[in-house]
Amino acid sequence: MVALAASCLRRLGLLEASVPVVLGGGVLQGGDPRLMTGIERGLAAVAPLARPTRVSVPPVVGAVLLALQHQGAPASVLEAARGQVSARYA
């Protein structure tokens, strides 16, 4: 994970920037302290200002929201869908 994040930040010229590094997926959502500490330390070594952040919802939520947004759904529908899909796949 650190190598992937570092590679992306390097290519974008963001190694010295204060940017979020969003971590997602089932293993990372579990938040194992040893895993997260390793990622945080490794990331700090290559991009000290980067802020690792775990995704709090399943990836399918983003796909649903993008599809609804593409169809012109209002904010109230997006928020309702986010809650419903998050609850369904939690």
Image (cartoon, rainbow, N blue to C red):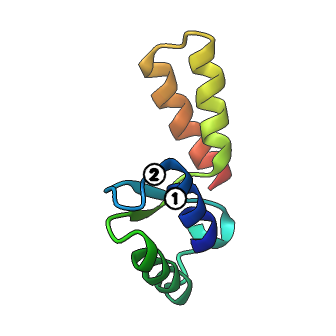
Q: Residue at x 58, y 48 (%)?
A: 87
Q: List x then y, in percent, for residue 3.
A: 61, 71
- Could you tell me which secondary element the residue under label 2 belongs to? loop
Q: Residue at x 58, y 46 (%)?
A: 86
Q: Residue at x 47, y 13 (%)?
A: 74
Q: Quadrant of the C terminus?
A: bottom right
Q: Nearer the viewer, residue 65 or 44?
A: 44
Q: Is residue 29 left or right of residue 60?
A: left
Q: List x then y, in percent, for residue 8.
A: 57, 56
- Amino acid of disc 1: Arg
Q: List x then y, in percent, for residue 77.
A: 50, 20
Badge 1: few (under 14), some or many (20 or more) residues near its Cα, within 10 Å?
A: some
Question: Which circle marks residue 64 in the picture?
Answer: none
Q: Nearer the viewer, residue 29 or 41?
A: 41
Q: Is residue 55 visible?
A: no
According to the picture, the residue beneath numbered tag 2 turns out to be 13
Q: CA distance from mark 1 to mark 2?
A: 5 Å
- Amino acid of disc 2: Gly
Q: List x then y, in percent, for residue 12.
A: 51, 48
Q: Is residue 48 left or right of residue 27?
A: left
Q: Is residue 68 visible?
A: yes
According to the picture, the residue beneath numbered tag 1 turns out to be 10
Q: Residue at x 45, y 51 (%)?
A: 13
Q: Is residue 75 left or right of residue 35?
A: left
Q: Nearer the viewer, residue 15 or 37?
A: 15
**Residue 28 sits in quarter:** bottom right
Badge 2: few (under 14), some or many (20 or more) residues near its Cα, within 10 Å?
A: few
- The answer to whether mark 1 and mark 2 are in CB contact below 8 A is yes
- Could you tell me which secondary element the residue under label 1 belongs to? helix
Seen in the picture, residue 44 relative to 12 is either above or below; the reply is below
Seen in the picture, residue 55 relative to 39 is either above or below; the reply is above
